[in-house]
Image (cartoon, grey):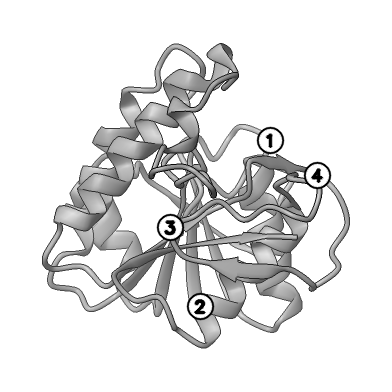
Amino acid sequence: MRITVFGATGNVGRRVVAEALARGHEVTAVVRNPAKPHGLPPTVTLAVGDADEPADVARIAAGQDLVVTATRPAPGREHELAATTRGLLAGLAGTGVRLLAVGGAGSLTVPGTDGTILVESPGFPAEIRPIALACGEQLELYRADGEVDWTYLSPAALLEPGVRTGRFRLGRDELLVDADGNSAISMEDLAVALLDEAEQPVHRRARFTAAY
């Protein structure tokens, strides 16, 4: 497949790029500043553009099979995630190119509650509440879209660098927890879940989640 990745230099994006390359896909990584060191593998094709700009998205997505977005705004600029989402949706409208978005866990419902979402649960860390709420708005923008073939991947509550095991569980809109009540997955395995979905689509125009 020909895969374009926005946010390819971020923590999750780098692992998506690595997993896609390992599976033999052709990867284009989108950067805003080509002069800035990016540390991406030499087999990656670089494209210059901005996910907020529909014209850039349409240009870069031309001839591609799939666009992945793993962008994350800097702290204090969480509101920019909505603009990025609108730019991607507008740029891909009518192109037939599929979009896979790496989102957040905050909008997943907590098991054993009356539908309380994670970001509204007691003890949710205040410092990550802004990005969790922004990701919730991001998901609603996807759900309101009627043109793009999108899929939204929510990680487990704890997403950290780790190892690639290839072993995890999938769910839909409820937070996945283990027998001890923990919800976690490595960034490496989240990339596996995303590329599995890319190669064998199951959750079209829907959200899914992955955790151990």
Residue type, numbered disc 4: Pro
Residue type, numbered disc 1: Pro
Q: Is residue 26 above or below residue 206?
A: below
Which residue is identified by label 4?
Answer: 161
Mark number, residue 9: none
Observer-side mark, 4 or 1, equals 4
Where is residue 104 drawn, in percent x and y? 49, 42
Cα–Cα span, label 4 and label 1:
21 Å
Cα–Cα span, label 2 and label 1:
28 Å
Which residue is identified by label 2?
Answer: 198
For the question of whether residue 87 can be seen, the reply is no
In depth, the one of 100 and 211 nearer the eye is 211
Observer-side mark, 1 or 3, equals 3
Which residue is identified by label 1?
Answer: 37
For the question of whether residue 138 can be seen, the reply is yes
In depth, the one of 1 and 152 nearer the eye is 152
- Looking at the image, is mark 2 or mark 4 earlier in the sequence? 4
